[in-house]
Amino acid sequence: MKPKHFLSLFDCGEEELHAIVARGIELKEHQQTGKSHTTCAGRVLGMIFELRSTRTRVAFEAGMYQLGGSSIFLNADDTQLGRGEPIEDTARVLSQMLDIVMIRASKHETIAKFAEAATIPVINGMSDLLHPCQLLADIQTFIEQRGPIKGRTVAFVGDGYNMCNSYIEAAAQFDFQLRVATPRSHAPTYLPAESRRHVVLLEDPASAVDNADLVVTDVWSSMGHEQELDRKQSFDGFQIDSHVLDNANPGCLFLHCLPAHRGEEVDEFVLDDPRSAVWQEAGNRLHSQKALIEHLLSVD
Ligand code: CP
């Protein structure tokens, strides 16, 4: 039987996703009240990072430890991956030694190939296409701060890249309306059929944010695109500051997956605006990823 993977939000049903988010909220309470939750005792998580990370790595490593298991950090430089061992061969080998694997790779295809060959669950820790783990934390944060997200209006302003694509999937899976505002040159090219009735593509940030319940942005130069010099020019007018949030619903929430570039997609102040929950969002990576590991290992 094929293992359960999490490469995309569409790898889970709506009920499964809601259960993972609810469990993340519960695990946060356990963590904060000191209640033991060592549901993964004796289990080992492998973490393959082709690209750098702070939040994803620490959340998975600390999370696995708190669940009673352990984790191994692997990168190309220190493994045979760096000497050209095929990703499928690596998947076959690691499947016999580990219980679950997380991969962050520059190409989504690498993660898909690994998952195809693996006989243990595989988690997408971010690719050029999607960042589904971040969405679990974002949805948990919205629910904690503002209640159910179903039927709400979400504005994604910025680059139509992996975070935007995962919001496009989330709109279908969590049943909200998504307005995406990007420069025409950076509009998302990923629009699955399931999401079409939930998503509007715009080029004007003000129209997207108007009366929105949640405003989200991400860096203008994601990992691997830092050298593209014309980006700042392309995104002129797409910066989020408190005045932009003033046009949203008065009870709106602001999220950013971090790291943020102050002076580019955000001004100096908006991350600490009372409507921002970016620090809680980052912290929720820990709890939501623990819930995801439990779910994929069927120990929840
Ligand atoms: N948001 C996010 O994935 O952060 P890291 O790149 O630090 O893991």
Image (spheres, rainbow, N blue to C red):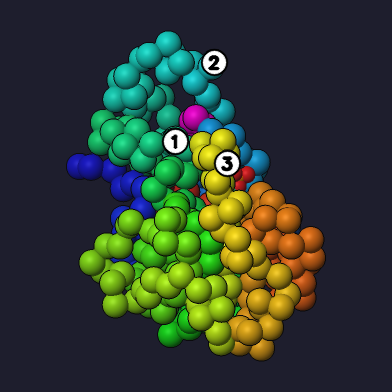
Report the residue marked by disc 3. 229
- Depicted 38 relative to depicted 160: above or below: above
Q: Is residue 117 left or right of residue 40?
A: left
Q: Nearer the viewer, mark 2 or mark 3?
A: 3
In primary-sequence order, the first of circles 2 and 3 is: 2
Q: Is residue 272 left or right of residue 161?
A: right
Amino acid on which the number 3 mark rests in the picture: Leu
Separation of marks 2 and 3 at Cα, in angstroms: 32 Å
- Depicted 127 relative to depicted 94: above or below: below
Amino acid on which the number 1 mark rests in the picture: Ser
Q: Which disc, if any, is residue 106? A: 1
Residue plotted at (54% across, 15% down): 78
Mark 1: which secondary structure? loop
Which picture quadrant has residue 189?
bottom left
Q: Which residues are magenta?
A: 46-50
**Magenta highlight on residue 48:** yes
Separation of marks 2 and 1 at Cα, in angstroms: 18 Å
Mark 3: which secondary structure? loop
Q: Position of residue 131 (x, y in %)?
A: 46, 51
Report the residue marked by disc 2. 78
Predominant secondary structure, magenta span: strand
Q: Determine contact: label 3, label 1, CB under 8 Å.
A: no
Q: Position of residue 249 (x, y in %)?
A: 61, 87
Amino acid on which the number 2 mark rests in the picture: Asp
**Magenta highlight on residue 5:** no
